Amino acid sequence: MTRTRTEHHPSRVVAAFSAAALVAAGAITLVAASSAARADLPLTDCGQVDFTLSPDMNGDGRGEIILVSASAHKGLEIIPVTAAGEPGIGSTVATDHDFSASKVYGPGDWNGDGKADIVEVDQAGYMWLWPGDGNNGLGSRVEIGHGWKPFRIIPAGDLTQDGANDLLAIDKQGRLWLYYGSGRGGFKGTPRQVGQGWVGLELYAAGDLNGDRKNDILAILPDGTLWAYQGRGNGTFGVPKQVGRGWGTFKLAAGADLNGDGRADIVGQDTVRTKDIYHSEDYLYYYRGNGGGSFQAPKIIMQRIGYYPHCEVFMGPAWDNISISPTASPGRYPWGN
């Protein structure tokens, strides 16, 4: 295995992988309890530590929400979204690997086999490729790089229109770098700086927002405004356009068409604080893309309610079976312009 180091950049490793499939389907368990006394119970104490989107893990033409679980198995849970914007039947990826301390990304097809994959960056900064089997399962992981700990990583799809997906990364100085994907599970060439001044800003993959077949990105500024940067197809981006506001308290995942209508959607998470220090409510919202960087009004697809030390989770059609109103505080929704 050959490693290549470049000053200021993570090393890059290209290697073969094992395609052994580890998959199990079934209903998803999303209930956990907090074991530590604290003033609030964020979503992470309800069995989830992170979430991202994947373009299509099972070949049905729609993206999925990938939950990184902090529950008993500490693995990955895949939640599809129906054409109506409701969460479908989820499945738990069968692996004994603990993802709860890692950053997990859904870059799409990273190794060129036509199936969406998962990329993990662990606490030590090692980057791992988990090849997808096309049926919500993963093969054996392989290391594809190290030194990524200080970087913020954005798997933004094929930014150069060469048929291979790429990565964007932001270093500690706020410089934005483009890492060219090889299309075979690693990287190629030398990273290219394509921006600067990204300190304090949050950057997200957005897929094709405007229908020009070029991948775009979204950014949340410190004032909570949401901006769309249209890709030019050469790894650079056009003049940003404001497409929303009120996103300062939200965590966002973007870059996938979740309902199969050909437009990129986004998912956002918000925590609603209450006067009771032992009570918190967290919401996962689905924003259906309109094209052009605008989105429809949010739909709640998951609610987690914490009353220390217990936590309950409600999803989609289950709203009809509970007595708690599935609404957040008026005025807190980040509406698109």
Image (spheres, grey):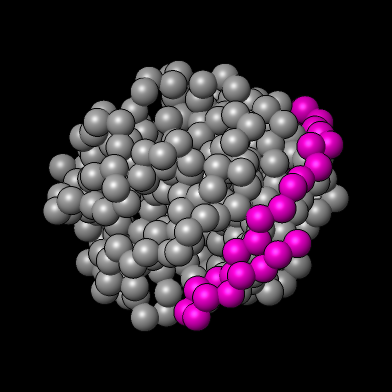
Q: Quadrant of residue 23?
A: top right
Q: Is residue 7 visible?
A: yes
Q: In which quarter of the image is residue 24?
A: top right
Q: Quadrant of residue 231?
A: top left
On the image, the x and y values in percent for residue 156 come to 42, 48
Marks counted in the figure total 0
From this view, report whether residue 68 is shown above or below residue 23: below
Q: Nearer the viewer, residue 167 or 224?
A: 167
Q: Residue at x 52, y 75 (%)?
A: 6
Q: Residue at x 59, y 36 (%)?
A: 112
> Is residue 31 shown left or right of residue 155?
right
Image quarter in which the C terminus is found: top left
Q: Is residue 325 visible?
A: no
Q: Is residue 329 magenta?
A: no
Q: Residue at x 27, y 71 (%)?
A: 196
Image quarter in which the N terminus is found: bottom right
Residue range of the region highlighted in magenta in the rendering: 1-29
Q: Residue at x 55, y 24 (%)?
A: 317
- Overall secondary structure of the magenta section: loop
